[in-house]
Amino acid sequence: MIEFILRENVLTDNTLELSEKGKVFHGGYIAIIKEYTFQSAWSDKLRVKKFRSAIRLKEYLAKKYPECNYIEFKGTNIDN
């Protein structure tokens, strides 16, 4: 698994987890995004987005995280 930080928050970071080439996560997913939103001063609420398609992942990243164009997909199932 390869992990990237998409956005740094105060308590927790939004992360992108990519499966390595030739492997998939349980359920056939190739990517998982863990997003945290403010819940209280001591904790954040977790929201997990899972992707089976590289096209849907790239669309979501372009919409929600346009500043994250540094992500290198080399060595993953989303290899350009």
Image: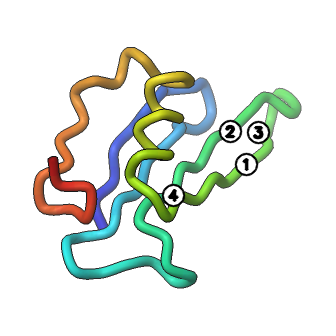
Image position, residue 69 (x, y; %): 27, 24
Q: For residue 36, which numbered disc appears in the image? A: 2
Quadrant position of residue 23: bottom left
Q: Amino acid at mark 2?
A: Tyr
Which residue: 25% across, 65% down?
77
Image position, residue 36 (x, y; %): 68, 38
Point out the tag, 2 or 1, that comes first from the N-terminus. Answer: 2
Task: Pick whichever, 27 or 42, lies toward us.
Answer: 27
Task: Pick whichever, 45 or 68, lies toward us.
Answer: 68
Instruction: Give the mark count.
Output: 4
Quadrant position of residue 20: bottom left
* Distance between mark 3 and mark 4 Cα atoms: 18 Å
Instruction: Tell me the mark number nearer the camera, choosing from 2 and 4.
Output: 4
According to the image, label 3 marks what residue?
Answer: 44
Instruction: Tell me the mark number nearer the camera, choosing from 3 and 4.
Output: 4
Image position, residue 61 (x, y; %): 46, 32
The furthest residue to the top: 67
SS at circle 4: strand
* Distance between mark 2 and mark 4 Cα atoms: 13 Å
Point out the tag, 2 or 3, that comes first from the N-terminus. Answer: 2
